Amino acid sequence: MTALTVTELMKSYAPGVRVLDGVSLTIASGEFFTLLGPSGCGKTTLLRCIAGFLQPDAGRIEADGTRLDTIPAHRRDIGMVFQDYAIFPHLTVADNVGFGLKARGMKAAEIAPKVVEALRMVRLDGLADRLPADMSGGQQQRIGLARAMAIRPRLLLMDEPLSNLDAKLRLELRADIRDLQRRLGITTVYVTHDQEEALAVSDRICVLQAGRIEQVATPFELYRTPASRFAAAFVGAMNFLPARIVGGGLEFAGQHLPMPGATAGAVEVAIRPEDVALGDGPIGLSGTVSNIAFLGREATVQIETPFGRIEHLAANPSADLLASLGRPVRLHLPAERIAIFAADGVRVPAAFA
Amino acid sequence: MRAVHGLDVWKIVQALVWAMLAVLLAWPLSGIVRASLLAHDHFGLGNFVEVFSQPRHLRAIGNTLLVGAGGMVGAMVLGVTLALLVVRVRLRGRAAIQTLAVLALVSPPFIGAYAWIVMFGANGAVRRGLMDIGITLPPIYGAGGVMLVFSFKFFPNVFLIVSAALAQVNRSLEEAAEGLGMSPMRRFWRITLPMITPAMSAAALLAFVLSIADFGTPQLIGRGFEVLATQAFQLYAADLGENPGLASALSLVLVALSMGLVVAQRRLLRRDVFHGNTLKPRPPARLAGWHQVGAHALAYLIVGIGIAPSLVVLVFSFRATRGPVFQPGFGLASYERVFHSVTAPVWNTLLYALTAMVGIVVLGTLIGYLVTRRKSLATAVLDGVLMVPYVVPGVVMGIGFVAAFNTPPLALTGTGAVIVLAIFIRRLPYAARAAATALRQVSPSLEDAAISLGLSPARAFLRVTARLILPGILAGGMMSFVTAMNELSSSLVLYVSGTITMPVRIYVAVVNGDYGVAAALSSILLAITAIAVYAAFRLSDRRQSALVG
C-alpha cells in the first residue's frame, strides 16, 4: 500500500537555483525510506516540504491518497526527529514526550500511560521527571524519538538524527531506531549524508544530487548495481579507471574485450576494492604496492598501475601481504564485477561477448 | 511559520512594524528635513549655508567633535584598562567591581554632570576643601569638564563590551603563540589585541556617538561652551528669536556626524570577524607584590570615581537646607519638599517609563523575531532602519516629534503620550537587538518540533520560543525601563507643566540652583533604577549581555 507520493516537486530559494528539480517518489506503507546525498543535494529541503515547514513551488505531496501539501504543518500528523534533538529545555522529559498529546487536547490522565509506554520503548523509563538539560545527546535524541512516536503519526520524518552523536552511540541508536520502526510498522523518511548509515537501516534508498533523483533502490541493488557514476562513487568505495569503447569492444589496460553493439567513446571502468583480485586472471594488470592500511579484520592496499591507482580490499590479510609495500604485484578484475560508465555518468551494460 | 493557507501571522506583524516606523520615525524625521529647508519662509539651503558660515555654529560643530573624541578617548582608556584588569588579573572583589561599573552605567546621565558641579563647580565642596589646603583648581566648567564627565560616564559601556570580548578570546591561540616562543607583551599586542579589535572599535564608536548626542552634560557644565545638541535646543526653545529651521539644520548635521561614524566603522570592520570558542577561558594571572596592590588600586579607583557622582548626590540629598540653600548638618528637608510640592514628576516618570517599557518589550521581541527568524530582504532593511534611532540624539527626536504631532490627525503635543512615544522609538532598537541575541540562542527547530507536534505557528511561538527567551526579554525590559525613566533630552523638548518628568524636573532644579530638590529627586531616581537593575540581574543569568544587548 502506498503511504506517501511525491509528484514533480519543485523548490527554489533564489531565482534560477533549483534546490528540488522535479522530484517524484512513491513510498510504501511501513517502509523505511532514506534520502541520501551530499550537503546541498536537496534532501533536507524535500523532508521539510513533506513536514510542511517549506512550501514547494510546484508539485504535489499526497499521503494515503489525500493531498498533504495544502494542509498546514501542525495539522499534518507527522512526527519529526531533528538533528539537534529540539528537546524543549524548559519541560521535563515526560512533558516533552506528552507535548503532542497535550496539543491534541488529550486529558492528563490519558497522556500519562502513553508517555510511560513511549519512554519504555526508547529505554528511558525512570527518567520521566528529569529536565533534559543535564542529559546526554543520546538520551536527548531518545526523548525526541519517543516524543515523535507518542502521537502515533502517519509518517515519521528524521533529519540526520544521529550526526551529532559520537560513533558508538550512533551505532547503538541506529539499531534501536530500526528495531522500533519495524515493530511499530511506521512509515519513515530518513535523511542522512552517511552512506553506511543509509545502507544499514533502509528498506530503500533514494540518492539525490543537485535536486534530482540519481537512483532509488534497495541497499543491495544500490551497492551492487549503481545506476550512475555519482551513485557508484557516493555509496561505498569504488575504483574508476579510464577506458574507451572502440570498434564494438572495450579497450582497457592494453586489452580488447568484445562488446558487440556498444557505442564508441570514452568510458570509465569501475570496480569495488573488495572485488579487485590479486593474482592472474582474464583482465589482468601489473602494478606496485604504494600504501597499505591495516584495519584489523581487513586491509586496504593501494596499487599503482600504468592505468591508474587501484585500491584492493583484502579480508583477513596475511602477514605476507602486509609486508608487500613497494613490491610488484599482479591483479585482475573479474569481468562480472565490472561496471562501465559513459562520459555523462550513465551506466553502460557490460555485456562482454 | 509559513502557514500554507491563510495569511502568515508574521506578515501582518511585519506590516504593522513598518507602519509604526513610518509614523514614529520617518514622519518626524522628514519633518525636521522639511523645517531645515525652510529659512525665513524661503525654501532652500539657507539654513545650511548659515550653519556652515556662522562662526558660532562652526564652533559648535568643532566642539561637538572635540567632546566626542575626548569622551571616546577617556572612556576607552578607563574602560579598556578596567577590562584588562578584571579579565586578566586575579582581583579581590571582581563581582563588586563589575556591579559598581554597571551601577555607574545605569545612573541617570545628567546626575554625573550635576554631581561633578557639586564637587568641582565654582562653589564645589571638594574644590573648596582643596583650596583650604592651598590647592587651587579651576572650576570644572567648559570643554575639559565635559570631556572628563563623559569619560567617567561612558567608560562602563566600553568596559562591558571589551571585557566580554576578552573573555571569549580563544585561549589556545594565545597558548599557541606562547608555545612558539612569543613574550607575554608581544603576545598581547600581536594576538590578543587584534582579536578584540572589533569589540574595541564598536565600544569606541558607542562612546563617541553617546558623547556627541549627550545634551544634559554640556548644557549643565558647558557654561558658554556650546555643542550642536545644546545649540539646537536653544535655538528651538528660545523665548525670543526661536528659529526651528536653523535648529533643524543643526540637528541634521549632528545626525549626519553620528551616521557617518557608524557607517565608517562598519566599513572598516566586518562584524563578528573573530569567533570565540567554548574552551575554558584563560585563568586570570596572579600578580606579585606591588603589581598586585597597584592593579587593585587602579581598578577600584576607576569604578570608585565612576560611582562617586551617585554617592555625592545621595549624600547631598540628606543635607539640611533652607529653601534652595544648603545648611550645615543633615536633615530630610529636601525630601519633604519633594513630597509636598513635586510629586507629579515622580508619578509621571513611573507611568511613562512603564508604558514605554511594555511597548518596547512587545515590539522589540517581535522585531527581533522577524530579523532573526524571518530572514528576507525586507527584514534585513528593517534591521538597518532600526539603526536610525540609535544615531538620532534625543533633542533631535524631540524637535521632530513636536513638528510631527502638533496638528491633527495626530495632535499629541503637550500630552504624556508624545513623551512616551519618543522614548519608545528611541529605545526600541536596543530591545530588538537584545531579543535577537536571545533568539539566536534558541534553536529554530524547537519551534518546528512544536508545530509538527500539533501546535499552530502562533501558539508554538508563544509556548516554546517566547517562553525560552522570556528571562532575557524581561531583563532587557527592566533595562528599557531604566533608560526610559532616565530620559532627559527628548522629554525636555516635549514636556509641558502637566507632563514634567523627574529628569526634566531635576534639570530645571539644577538650572535654578535648587540643588536640594535636585539631589532628593535624583536619589529617588537612583533608588528605583537600582531596584530595576537588581530585578534584571535576578532575571538574567547572563548578567552583562542583558546590558550590552
Image: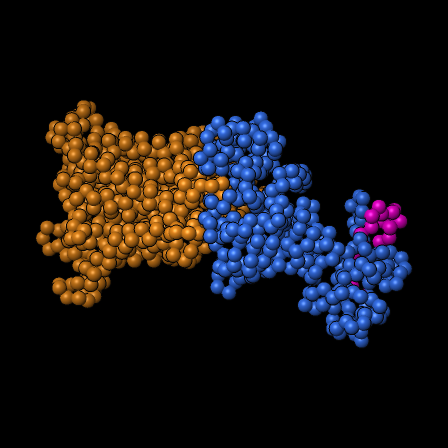
Taking the magenta stretch, the answer to whether it contains residue A210 is: no
Query: In this view of the protein, can residue A278 be seen by the observer?
Result: yes
Q: Looking at the image, which is closer to me, B434 or A138?
A: A138
Q: Quadrant of the C terminus of chain A?
A: bottom right
Q: Looking at the image, which is closer to me, A147 or B53?
A: A147
* Left or right of residue B388, residue A299 in this image: right
Query: In this view of the protein, can residue B120 be seen by the observer?
Result: no
Q: Looking at the image, which is closer to me, B479 or B284?
A: B479
**Residue B154 in picture, x, y percent from top left:** 33, 43
* Left or right of residue B370, residue B408 in this image: left
**Residue B212 in picture, x, y percent from top left:** 29, 50
Taking the magenta stretch, the answer to whether it contains residue A313 is: yes
User: Which residue is at 18% across, 38% downward?
Assistant: B505
**Residue B526 in picture, x, y percent from top left:** 27, 33
**Residue A70 in picture, x, y percent from top left:** 46, 52
Chain B rendering hue: orange
Chain A rendering hue: blue
* Left or right of residue A176, residue A128 in this image: left
Quarter occupied by residue A241: bottom right
User: Which residue is at 26% across, 58% downward?
Assistant: B253
Q: How is the image coloured?
A: by chain
Q: Which residue range is magenta in the image? A: A307-327
